[in-house]
Image (cartoon, helix red, strand yellow):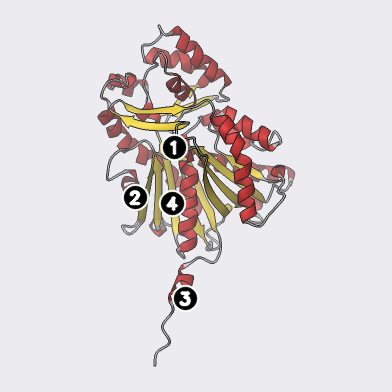
Amino acid sequence: MGSAPATVRDIRRAQRADGPAAVLGIGTANPPTCLAQDEYPDYYFRITHSEHLTDLKGKLTRICNKSGIRQRFVHLDEQLLAANPDFTDRALPSLDARVDIASAAVPELAARAAAKAIAEWGRPATDITHLIFSTYSGARAPSADRRLASLLGLSPTVSRTVLSLHGCYGGGRSLQLAKELAENNRGARVLVACSEITLIAFYGPEDGCLDNILGQAIFGDGAGAVIVGADPVGPVERPLFEMAFASQTTIPDTEDAISMEINKGGMEYHISNQVPRLVGCNVERCLTDAFDALGVAGVKWNDLFWAVHPGGRAILDRIEGVLGLDDDKLAASRRVLSEFGNMSGTTVIFVLDELRRRRAAKQDTSGEEAPEWGVMMAFGPGITIETMVLHTPVGLEGN
């Protein structure tokens, strides 16, 4: 007789990974056009032929000066705008042209970031089993995930998922989904790609429409990619951050606080000035719930490292104040905001990349041990808060 058949429980156990999911590689990319923040009001009102709107220009100037942003990168340049003058007026039907441009540019930018992540990971692209692509910049099928898979030469059997219009929490949502895939599919290697270009939401200023002015002051373009997998295969794979716990929380009665809508003139968005307060009122509860789920009580926030989505300077200031964080705790987030602006869901990947560089540099220069445990957080429409507890494997900074 043959051996007894395996039970469903046995089969399920064999399908799962033994250890936690971990970040195995990170890559980032930006378009070539760089805009200095202190020059942006003059630039924006000139290219949109709106210099007569002096009051709005003054408001944009004040927002830019207080934004904590030094520069941003964008796909839309003056040559592209000259070929598509309708982009400056959201009342004109320019969506088709925007989608044509984004359908090519979004996956190409993602491919640049992904190539860096794959190179750091150290294994062939064909070993990727799952692809998660997050963007608000596309509106076509087959979508950016399909094009990215072709550009990277991924296997035809790669399992693809698209997250659309998640906005600024798209990076956090993608990483939580990648964690679940990696831990529940033994040997899985998940490529997370987030790519955004603000061309889909670019248009000229309008009297009485301050949402557009705010968006023009803070948003930039970029792509981030992360390889996620459990049970790293040595010596090739090195875990950068282990994913210990992840959760999503929606703040009640905040459906209208952050919103996005695609129409014939592109994407329109609304961002309430109450967002920093709403996030600040809920962030500590999300953190406490996360550590309670791990059976850890009484965590001191300053004993952790922090990778927080820099939705804006006011959000970072509010979180810092509510949690009583030391000045250096959100340094990685503030630097990414300064050098790249808010790139929506992509931004938290840039923060993870900046954070790991800072930790390595600190270890190399001072020999001081960085915190072993930390938190990644992202915020977006809903209002949705993504929380992930991270752990640094011993010896990371020395690798």
Asked if 41 appears above or below 236 in the picture, the reply is: above
Q: Earlier in the sequence, mark 1 or mark 3?
A: 3
Residue wearing tag 4: 191
12 horizontally vs 294: left or right = left
Disc 2: CA contacts within 10 A as few (<14), some (14-19) or many (>=20)? many
Mark 3 is on which residue type?
A: Asp
The residue most toward the bottom is 1
Q: Nearer the viewer, mark 4 or mark 3?
A: 3
Above or below, comparing residue 64 to residue 179 in the picture: above
Residue 162 on image: x %, y %: 37, 47
Tell me, for residue 10, which label it has, or none. Answer: 3
Q: Which mark is residue 210?
A: none
Judging by the rendered image, the residue that carries numbered circle 1 is: 167
CA gap between label 1 and label 3 equals: 40 Å
Q: Which mark is residue 149?
A: 2
Closer to the eye: label 4 or 1: 1
Taking the image as drawn, is residue 150 in sight? yes
Task: Please indicate, yes or no, whether residue 119 appears anywhere in the rendered image.
Answer: no
**Most foreground residue, 340 or 362:** 340
Position of residue 66 in the picture relative to residue 207 (left or right): right
